[in-house]
Image (spheres, rainbow, N blue to C red):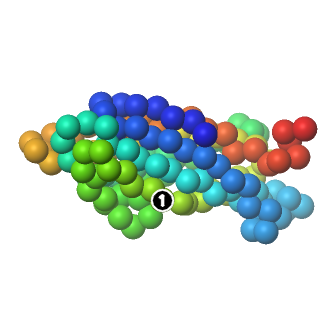
């Protein structure tokens, strides 16, 4: 698991290879990732949008942007957290992702970005 804190918002990510949804013979490797977003600050925040950078080990790069996460724009009170699971497919058996969330402090509607730490998507057999 990797973790980072930006402006009082802690983001932790862990990954799981999904062999049942992968087809290595056709260069299709599926990974799930679980994200926990914790509000360690003094004010409620809302997650508005996400921006991902996805890298395959063959040098391919993709960007994904959109509103919220898995169809939600959660509000997170101080001391509370929000967790979700999503997925990513790669054309190689290892790669990485990183990015940022656009957040809003609800007390004054100020917008700020929260870093999503870089994490690695690696098939278990590559770890040996």
Image vertical order of residue 15 relative to residue 11, above or below: below
Residue 54, given in percent of the width and then of the height, sits at 59, 44
> What is the residue that sits farthest to the front in this orientation?
79
Between residues 95 and 73, which one lies in front from this camera angle?
73
Residue occupying the point 83% across, 47% down: 124
- Asked whether residue 66 is in view, the answer is no
Position of the C terminus, as image quadrant, is top right
Image vertical order of residue 51 relative to residue 8, above or below: below
Residue underneath mark 1: 84
- Kindly state the secondary structure of the residue where label 1 is placed: strand
Residue occupying the point 63% across, 57% down: 32
Residue 46, given in percent of the width and then of the height, sits at 25, 52
Between residues 65 and 12, which one lies in front from this camera angle?
12
- Asked whether residue 63 is in view, the answer is yes
> What is the residue that sits farthest to the left in this orientation?
108
Question: Looking at the rendering, which quadrant does residue 43 occupy?
Answer: top left
Residue occupying the point 41% across, 59% down: 69
Few, some or many C-alpha atoms within 10 Å of disc 1 (few <14, some 14-19, many ≥20)?
Answer: few
Q: Is residue 43 left or right of residue 65?
A: left
Between residues 8 and 113, which one lies in front from this camera angle?
8
Position of the N terminus, as image quadrant, is top right
Q: Is residue 5 left or right of residue 73?
A: right
Image vertical order of residue 11 relative to residue 20, above or below: above
Q: How many marks?
A: 1
Q: Is residue 62 left or right of residue 59?
A: left
Residue 53, given in percent of the width and then of the height, sits at 53, 42
Residue 82, given in percent of the width and then of the height, sits at 39, 55
Residue occupying the point 60% across, 46% down: 14
């Amino acid at each position: 698991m990797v973790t980072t804190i930006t402006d009082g918002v802690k983001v932790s990510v862990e990954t799981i290879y999904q062999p049942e949804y992968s087809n290595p013979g056709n260069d299709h490797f599926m990974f799930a990732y679980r994200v926990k977003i914790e509000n360690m600050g003094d004010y409620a925040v809302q997650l508005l949008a996400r921006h991902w950078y996805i890298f395959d080990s063959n040098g391919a790069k993709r960007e994904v942007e959109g509103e919220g996460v898995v169809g939600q724009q959660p509000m997170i009170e101080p001391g509370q957290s929000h967790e979700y699971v999503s997925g990513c497919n790669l054309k190689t058996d290892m790669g990485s992702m990183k990015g940022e969330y656009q957040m809003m402090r609800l007390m004054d509607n100020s917008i700020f970005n929260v870093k999503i730490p870089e994490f690695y998507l690696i098939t278990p057999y590559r770890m040996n």
